[in-house]
Image (cartoon, rainbow, N blue to C red):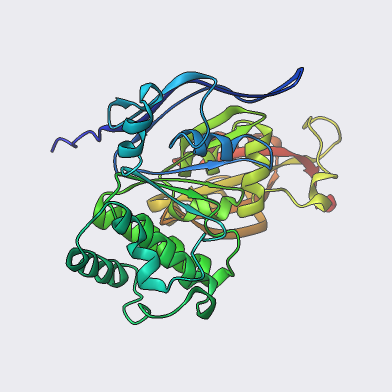
Amino acid sequence: MVTKQRQKMIQIKNLKKEYRTNNTSNLVLDNINLEIKQGEIFGIIGHSGAGKSSLLRCLNLLEQPTDGSIFIADENITKKNSKQLREFRKKVAMIFQHFNLLSSRNVFENIALPLEIQGIPKSEIKKRVFELLDLVELPNKANAYPQELSGGQKQKVAIARALALNPLVLLSDEATSALDPTSTKQILALLKRLNKELGLTIVLITHEMDVVRKICDRVAIIDKGRIAEMGKTLDVFLNPQVPVTRSFVETSIHTKVPDFIAKKLQDNPYSYDNTYPVVQLTFYGDKGKMPIIAEISRQFNATASIIQANIETIQDQIVGIAICHITGERQDWENALRFLSNQDVNLKVLGYATADNI
């Protein structure tokens, strides 16, 4: 069976954004290159000031790039004039951290606003608004005002308004940052459902790796205006390549070695007599069903003692992470490490410690 290749929805080429004031300049985006596929949920994460918001705002030209080009649905949007840009913006909608609803208008009127601006007949507006209210699971809130809604409900109204003109792309600017955990879970579930049901391409920026691991297909980590790392979400979580990515991953899943263990580890197995490897094993999918730790004791005259273990969910995949101390005669634990390195799991030797020091 041949898998159909998804088309590119967004292409960013050599993008730069520089802010100039008087005699000073601040380069916030430096040579950004990335592609986002049609129907993909793509996450952009970075610390405050890393450039992620500027990048998102360049995608609908709320920020004008200093250099480079942006293609959306094969159109070079950086070459469009004002009239063409107004038409293009129907294809790219945006939701925000603080919802940006009009307090003087009820839910129906807030959702209807972009349709009114386009001159859509009232009968069609009514039909479309109620379709959208059903879509975001707020069928009975048409007459409510923003101040009568919870934060999660306000964001649902904002999402419905953003979808009014059937956009190809939805940009999410920290859309869950102001929400409580329950509302965050609901909004992420809604975005994921809209992605599947509508084929909607979603680009979201966040500073929360938990958001990325729950719904993003791929993720780019931005640091100091550059893409530090990019890849499939599961790959980035299991094998972060740069320090900034590792720091984000450690805020979301428990991969960091506890300090009381880390300070006892030696880099060299020959530092002291009777030192043994401390390893981190990562299992996911069907790999987690293999009794590898038990197999070490069965096949080799070595013992794998579990120091720490936990189970995480990343992109609907169950991931198990265990830190073990493998003890025994040197030849036995070396054979055990060779065995582990040939198994379909991720093995990382964290260091070495004596049996009575862990």
Give coordinates of residue 266: x percent, y percent.
Answer: 81, 36
Residue 10, quarter of the rendered image? top left
The total number of labels drawn is 0
Residue at (45% x, 68% y) in the render: 186
Q: Is residue 301 visible?
A: no
Residue at (77% x, 17% y) in the render: 23
Q: Quadrant of the N terminus?
A: top left
Residue 131, quarter of the rendered image? bottom left
Give coordinates of residue 177: x percent, y percent.
Answer: 59, 58
Give coordinates of residue 208: x percent, y percent.
Answer: 60, 52
Left or right, 331 with reference to 146: right
Pick the residue in front: 338 or 195: 195
Pick the residue in front: 250 or 321: 250
* In the depicted structure, whether residue 182 falls above or below residue 278: below
Furthest toward the left, the residue is 1
Left or right, 304 with reference to 357: left
